[in-house]
Amino acid sequence: MSKQFEAVTIPKWGIEMTHGRIVSWRYSEGDQIEAGAELVDIETDKIVNSFEARVSGTLAKILVPEEEELPVGALIGVLALQAFEPGELEAFITAQTTTAPANVDAPPPDVAVSASDSDTATGVEGSAVVKISPALRRKLEKAGLAAADVTGTGHDGRILKEDVDRALAGSKVEAGSEGTILSATQSRIAKTLVDAQNSVPLFHIHRRLDVGSSIAALKQGNPNVRGVVTLLLLQGLRAALARYPELNVQFQGDAVRPVSGFNIALAVSRDDGAVSAPVLNDVPDEPVSAMAQRVSEIVDRARQGRLTASDQQPAAITISNLGMYDVTAFTAMVTPPQVMVLSVGMIQTQPVWNAETQAFAPRECLDVTLGCDHRWVNGAQGAQLLKALADFMQD
């Protein structure tokens, strides 16, 4: 018998991906889908990718609405390859749910899913039937609520999205000042940083950079360019990594692998409060104006949470700049698999010793702190990288 349905599941893009959030469905139920068509946009930790249909067919069922987050492998929709009866679709969904892999949000042990009603959760023997879709049930559970505590206003008491929204709103009112639940993206980033804090032997090296001449030279050749400090640091770090290519690596398990090109990540505060780190790819001999345009575009996408796979190429180091907030110096965390992070403060006028005149002179200076993963980068290597950066700024 020919294949009748094709399961649409959360794909695994990258070794570290464990969950995905549905950003938007490109089609509606009943639409004809061609193989290779971008079916649904899914957000991972930091990027949004489009999942392409593997076969042609009809979008028979959308099981997970937009904004819902599920683990890799979870069923989110079904494509029909040929004509079908409603009961056949329900049976397929039930079979996919009950045979889901261990990392998928299957119903808990004391909840059964009926073959005649795939989104109806039935309690243990003797308890009342609670009709609710798996996506809405997960939404309640994330907020610490049980489906049995929500009154459904749909047919036969089915719990609708409006019922869940009211329950969540009421829960927030009752919670008052007890706290705010983290978004899915914030939760993932928090876990990543906690894991990094517990596993990375991190140390920091501080250096003051004399940047007055470099800033003046760059502005002279590019008077309309904004973000001069970031542009200088991007160029300077690339030059430093070219001098010490053994530091241009990423961790892969217990080993390191070289990064192709001198790519640099930029820490960006998103509009939703999370932090992304898109990667600006290395383009040899790129004019400053072109680099400035690329930086502006990638920062805008990061702030809006619209990064794509092309914005997440491998990089050895991230620039985290808080100088625009009048921060003089700070220490950022290295985020694996990267091995370094450069924390950047504000430009300040500082007295700098001039060996030729044997006197101090006021100079525009930038305090930077290099965070290093000691599993690969030792103190001498970190200091050499900072010296190479300083040499570039004074060249």
Image: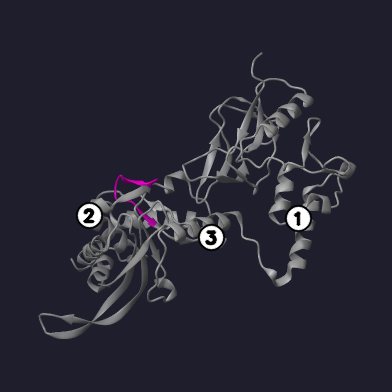
Check disc 1 and report its element: helix, strand or loop.
Answer: loop
Q: Which residues are magenta?
A: 252-265
Q: Front-most of 91 and 76? A: 91
Quarter of the rendering occupied by the C terminus:
bottom left
Q: Nearer the viewer, mark 1 or mark 3?
A: 1
Q: Residue extending furthest bottom?
A: 359
Q: Give residue 42's mark.
A: none
Q: Front-most of 387 and 226? A: 387
Please tell me which residue is depicted at 76% across the width and 62% down the height of the picture.
Answer: 171
Quarter of the rendering occupied by the N terminus:
top right
Q: How busy is the neighbourhood of tag 2: few (under 14 within 10 Å), some, or many (20 plus)?
A: some
Chain-order first, disc 2 or disc 1: 1
Please give the count of numbered marks on the rendered protein.
3
Please tell me which residue is depicted at 42% across the width and 76% down the height of the picture.
Answer: 326
CA distance for labels 2 and 3: 32 Å
Q: How busy is the neighbourhood of tag 1: few (under 14 within 10 Å), some, or many (20 plus)?
A: some
Amino acid carrying mark 1 in the image: Leu
Please tell me which residue is depicted at 50% across the width and 59% down the height of the picture.
Answer: 194
Q: Is residue 218 left or right of residue 191?
A: left
Colour scheme: one colour
Whether residue 340 is in magenta: the answer is no
Query: Which residue position is annotated with label 1?
Result: 145
Check disc 2 and report its element: helix, strand or loop.
Answer: loop
Query: Which residue position is annotated with label 2?
Result: 244
